[in-house]
């Protein structure tokens, strides 16, 4: 028996059938569960290459290091009071979680093809030069997917407030962005690859 918010009990139904039923009938929980399985992750080629390199490093080097530490800790004997063993097991669990997360990102990655980008409008993968209309200060951002965001390196997420408001805008347009300190007004000065 599966219990859902839509009904008290649905006898003799497996989970897949229930998910299919709920998708067709609008269950938020099942839509989230299904969409989480296939949600794309926007990445530049550079971002994708970094994720692949990190995955290879973790699998080929770090996994062996952690395995050796685990073997060494086991060799100390009594595991019930062996802090080295506990530490190595925790490190192994964290490492495997990170590897799975990277594999999931690689599977779901959608690489942005720079050759197909149109620089008439702001989109993910493009550099945007803006001017703060209040101060006259100019800044340059690269709009990237959320996994690549690094504000200190000038890479802002397409899901951030600034990124969302810049997307789709053209050179010369002004954009008002609500931030905790008030409203920022940026004028788009240039869009480049």
Image (cartoon, grey):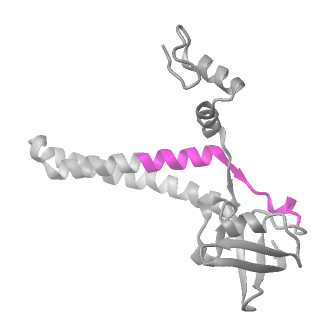
- Residue 74 drawn above or below residue 143: above
- Residue 86 drawn above or below residue 28: below
- Residue 149 drawn above or below residue 141: above
41, 59: nearer the viewer:
41
Residue range highlighted in magenta: 97-118
Residue at the farthest bottom position? 136
Q: Is residue 44 visible?
A: yes
Q: Is residue 113 magenta?
A: yes
Q: Is residue 149 left or right of residue 124?
A: left
* Residue at x 61% of width, y 48% of height: 106
* Residue at x 35% of width, y 46% of height: 93
Residue 126: % across, % down: 78, 69
Q: Quadrant of residue 53?
A: bottom right
Residue 52: % across, % down: 57, 54
Q: Is residue 125 visible?
A: no
Residue at the farthest top position? 12
- Residue 7 drawn above or below residue 97: above
Q: Quadrant of residue 19?
A: top right
Q: Is residue 39 magenta?
A: no
């Amino acid at each position: 028996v599966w219990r859902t918010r839509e009904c008290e009990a649905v006898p003799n139904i497996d989970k897949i059938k229930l998910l299919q039923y709920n998708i067709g009938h609008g269950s938020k929980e099942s839509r989230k569960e299904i969409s989480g399985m296939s949600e794309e992750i926007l990445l530049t080629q550079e971002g994708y290459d970094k994720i692949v390199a990190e995955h290879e490093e973790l699998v080929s080097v770090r996994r062996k290091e952690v395995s050796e530490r685990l073997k060494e800790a086991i060799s100390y004997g009594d595991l019930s009071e062996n802090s080295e063993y506990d530490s190595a097991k925790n490190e192994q669990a964290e490492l495997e979680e990170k590897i799975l997360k990277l594999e999931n990102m690689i599977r779901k990655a959608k690489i942005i093809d720079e050759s197909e980008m149109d620089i008439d409008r702001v989109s993910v993968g493009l550099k945007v030069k803006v001017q703060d209309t209040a101060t006259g200060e100019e800044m340059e951002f690269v709009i990237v997917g959320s996994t690549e965001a690094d504000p200190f390196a000038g890479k802002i997420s397409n899901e951030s407030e600034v990124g969302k408001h810049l997307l789709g805008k053209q050179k010369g347009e002004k954009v008002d962005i609500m931030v905790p300190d008030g409203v920022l007004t940026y004028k788009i000065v240039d869009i480049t690859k």
